[in-house]
Amino acid sequence: MNVELITKEDLRELENRLLTEIKKIVQGGGDSVSKKWLRSNEVRKVLKISPGTLQNLRINGTLRFTRVGGIIYYKQEDISKILEGGLK
């Protein structure tokens, strides 16, 4: 039977790594890969549009979306396409 001892220093190192990762998540990931799905309020901030304009983009089919329960999600790649010149 192989026994490994965990020291206080090991626990402190683990704590520091966990805190670093949690901070990255809370602050939006820093340099990590951006989120694949965005909520309505995030899309409005990125596109700098009102809730009504976002609704019009959904209604006229300019911006595709997925509804899960009462929450509407948008693909990050669709938002990027709009910013680059429009969806096709």
Image: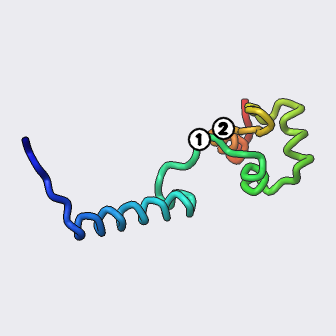
**Where residue 5 sits in the image (x, y, percent)?**
15, 58
The answer to whether 40 is drawn above or below residue 18 in the figure is: above
* Count of numbered circles in the view: 2
Residue type of the residue flagged with mark 1? Lys
SS class of the residue under badge 1? loop
Quarter residue 66 falls in? top right
**Where residue 38 sits in the image (x, y, percent)?**
68, 45
Q: Are marks 1 and 2 in contact (CB under 8 Å)?
A: yes
Q: Residue at x 64, y 42 (%)?
A: 76
Q: Which of 1 and 29 is in front in this view?
A: 1
**Where residue 19 sits in the image (x, y, percent)?**
43, 65
Q: Quadrant of the N terminus?
A: top left
Residue 45 vs residue 4: left or right?
Answer: right
| The residue positioned farthest toward the front in the image shown | 1
Marking on residue 68: none
The residue carrying mark 2 is: 75
The answer to whether 44 is drawn above or below residue 16 in the figure is: above
Q: How is colour applied across the structure in the image? A: rainbow
Q: Which of 24 and 2 is in front in this view?
A: 2
Q: Quadrant of the C terminus?
A: top right
Residue 28 vs residue 83: left or right?
Answer: left
The residue carrying mark 1 is: 36
Q: Which residue is drawn at 88% across and 41% down?
A: 55
SS class of the residue under badge 2? strand
Q: Label 1 to label 2, Cα distance in Å?
A: 6 Å
Residue type of the residue flagged with mark 2? Lys
Assess disc 2: are there few (<14), some (14-19) or many (≥20) residues with their C-alpha within 10 Å of its C-alpha: some
Q: Which residue is drawn at 23% across and 70% down?
A: 9
